[in-house]
Amino acid sequence: MLTKKEKELRKLEKDVLVCKKCVLCKKRNAPVIGQGSFKAKIMFVGEAPGAKEDATGIPFCGRSGKFLDELLKSAKIDREKVYICNIIKCRPPQNRDPEEKEIKACSQYIKKQVEIISPKVICPLGRYSMAFIMEMFGFTEDIDVISKVHGKVFKGRNTVIPFYHPAVAIYNPNMKKILKKDFKILKKYAD
């Protein structure tokens, strides 16, 4: 017997599978909808799927995902107990940044995921995700460059804690310490 959340998420998956609201649907292998616990207290929201994610339909399964796993482990958080998704569900060509019109076209899906999962804490990963999520929860005046807001806690009806995207540490190994320090904030929300 499916729970109400499972039914709602399955319906959302079906909607995404037939979505043709932007050009990204034409070249996708598989939309990357989300993965994790339907009872998650913590939700991570990335920006867009990469090549491995597009091939598998699994969010954060490539190099960035391996580092995300390392970050979760460093904060003593089990990946199976969080929910992970992206703002947009289809891969932009050559892993380019998501465009505003693509984010807008896909926004109803991420909003519905947040509503269904109903996490206590939402952690945007990267600048596009940060701007979208902070605006969604009314922290518009606090939006700044990611280097100024990463690891800060914004409390409202939901708590929002923006982080650098894990990929930043792949290109700049010096960022690993900063990301691990930021992720330690999540320990108190994981229980």
Image (spheres, helix red, strand yellow):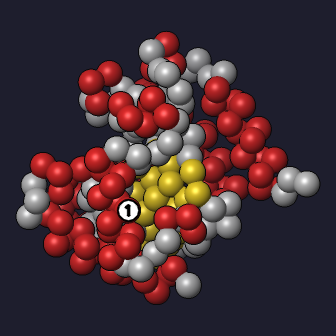
Residue 118 occupies which quadrant of the picture? bottom right
Nearer to us in this view, 23 or 143: 23
Nearer to us in this view, 136 or 1: 1
Q: SS class of the residue under badge 1?
A: helix
- Residue 12 is left or right of residue 25, and the answer is right
The percent position of residue 180, horizontal first and vertical second, equals 25, 73
Whether residue 133 can be seen here: no
Whether residue 110 can be seen here: yes
Residue drawn at point x = 34 percent, y = 44 percent? 62
Q: Which residue is mark 1?
A: 69
What is the crowding at mark 1: few (fewer than 14 residues within 10 Å), some, or many (at least 20)? some
Residue drawn at point x = 24 percent, y = 78 percent? 181
The percent position of residue 169, horizontal first and vertical second, equals 18, 57
- Residue 127 is left or right of residue 119, and the answer is left
The percent position of residue 66, horizontal first and vertical second, equals 33, 55
Residue 82 occupies which quadrant of the picture? bottom right
| Quarter of the image with the N terminus in it | bottom right
| Quarter of the image with the C terminus in it | bottom right
The percent position of residue 112, horizontal first and vertical second, equals 65, 47
Residue drawn at point x = 54 percent, y = 30 percent? 31
- Residue 117 is left or right of residue 159, and the answer is right
Residue type at tag 1: Asp
Residue 16 occupies which quadrant of the picture? top right
Residue drawn at point x = 56 percent, y = 64 percent? 80
Relative to 97, does residue 153 appear above or below in the rendering? Answer: below
Relative to 103, does residue 71 appear above or below in the rendering? Answer: below
Relative to 147, does residue 53 appear above or below in the rendering? Answer: above
